[in-house]
Image (cartoon, grey):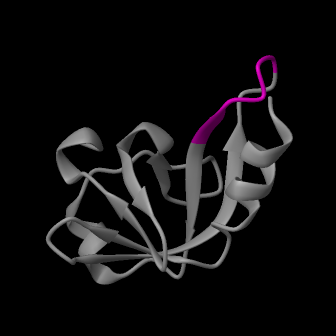
Amino acid sequence: MENNEKSYSKEMLGKTVVSKAGKKFGEVGDLIFEVGSGELIHLLLRNPTSYTDKMELEKTKEGDILIPFSAVIASGDFIVVAEEDII
């Protein structure tokens, strides 16, 4: 994994996760990498909104909500995800 990708992903921590339609999911609490490849596979949500309750999102054993990194379509002030790529 390239260094700039790792620092780029660290910048995601604490950012608000929203859908393309502007629905708020919560904040990025942690990043989950594939152990073998180091590839970023999930964003772990912190302070999830009630909007996420209506969705059948993948969860950790501890009950934390996971957003697949493949659903992320933009990263700036917010992390924008495509809802259709999550469900």
Q: Is residue 85 magenta?
A: no
Left or right: where does residue 47 sit relative to residue 29?
Answer: left
Expressed as whole percent of the image width and height from the top left, the position of residue 45 reads: 54, 66
Q: Is residue 37 magenta?
A: yes
Q: Residue furthest right?
A: 3
Quadrant holding the C terminus: top left
36, 2: nearer the viewer = 2
Expressed as whole percent of the image width and height from the top left, the position of residue 25 reads: 36, 73
- Residue interval drawn in magenta: 36-41
Quadrant holding the N terminus: top right
Residue depicted at 25% across the width and 51% down the height = 82
The image quarter in which residue 19 lies: bottom left
Q: Residue furthest top?
A: 36
> Is the residue 77 above or below the residue 59 in the image?
below
Expressed as whole percent of the image width and height from the top left, the position of residue 68 reads: 45, 42
31, 51: nearer the viewer = 31
Magenta stretch: dominant SS? loop
Left or right: where does residue 65 sit relative to residue 28?
Answer: left
> Is the residue 33 above or below the residue 73 in the image?
above
Residue depicted at 69% across the width and 55% down the height = 9
Expressed as whole percent of the image width and height from the top left, the position of residue 13 reads: 68, 70
